[in-house]
Amino acid sequence: MPSPSRRPVFVSACLLGRECRYDGRSNRDLALEALLDARGEIAVPFCPEEHGELGTPRPAAWIERSGASAVLDGVERVITGDGVDVTQAFLRGALGALETCQRFGIRRAYLKERSPSCGVCQTHAAGALVDGPGVTALVLQREGIDCTGVEGRRE
Ligand code: SF4
């Protein structure tokens, strides 16, 4: 439970050092930690893909063709490199992220760029980097949560 004196914000757990990336590594970002401190924000860490019970490590995955909007519309899937459909796990993760924001009254999120879940400006579709948000970022944005993409691994 975040301290009542500091504003809670949602943060991709890997940016805070949790080893929850698909390859079992983290994206710990010391510059983000300093920024949160300076802003009086307290992080609520969350990993949508672990919440979706994909486990760590796990196969890399991407949106099937165009982007997260098509996934939320039910016309595209999220698939692994071997073609396994992990769409429901990604949607469970996104819903869990939204529920976490609602529970803590969170209105701002710092999310790991380029992830098929957390990417804000860029994500992965059809096995390549594309402009647009990942599945969780889009769900949060549609609820009016201010999402900032974070590079990760900064000193
Ligand atoms: S980018 Fe998001 S889904 Fe991927 S490991 Fe980090 S928190 Fe989890």
Image: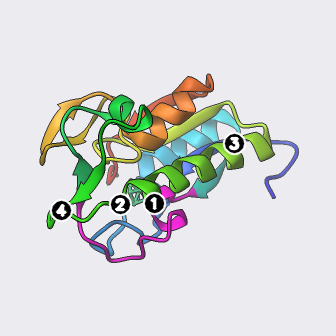
Q: What element carries label 2?
A: loop
- Within 8 Å of ligand 1, the CB of disc 3? no
Q: Residue 86 carries which label?
A: 2
Residue 30 in picture, x, y percent from top left: 43, 53
Residue 71 in picture, x, y percent from top left: 37, 38
Report the span colored magenta: 46-60
Ligand 1 positioned in quadrant: bottom left
Q: Mark 3 points at which residue?
A: 101
Q: Please, is residue 47 above or below residue 43 in the view?
A: below
Q: Is mark 4 on a helix, strand or loop?
A: loop
The reply to whether discs 4 and 2 touch (Cβ–Cβ < 8 Å) is no
The reply to whether discs 2 and 1 touch (Cβ–Cβ < 8 Å) is yes
The reply to whether discs 1 and 4 touch (Cβ–Cβ < 8 Å) is no
Q: Label 1, label 4: how many angstroms apart (C-alpha)?
A: 14 Å
Q: Label 2, label 3: how many angstroms apart (C-alpha)?
A: 23 Å
Q: Is residue 68 left or right of residue 37?
A: left
Q: What element carries label 3?
A: helix
Q: Label 3, label 4: how many angstroms apart (C-alpha)?
A: 31 Å
Q: In which quarter of the image is the N terminus?
A: bottom right
Residue shown at 78% from the left, 45% from the top: 104
Q: Mark 4 points at which residue?
A: 83
Q: Which amino acid does label 1 sit on?
A: Ala
Pair 2/3: label in front: 2
Q: Which amino acid does label 3 sit on?
A: Cys
The reply to whether discs 1 and 3 touch (Cβ–Cβ < 8 Å) is no
Q: Label 1, label 3: how many angstroms apart (C-alpha)?
A: 19 Å
Residue shown at 32% from the left, 77% from the top: 57
Local packing at callout 2 (Cα closer than 10 Å; few below 14, some 14-19, many 20+) is some
Q: Mark 1 points at which residue?
A: 89
Residue shown at 69% from the left, 49% from the top: 100
Q: In this view, does 154 lie to the left or right of 44?
A: left
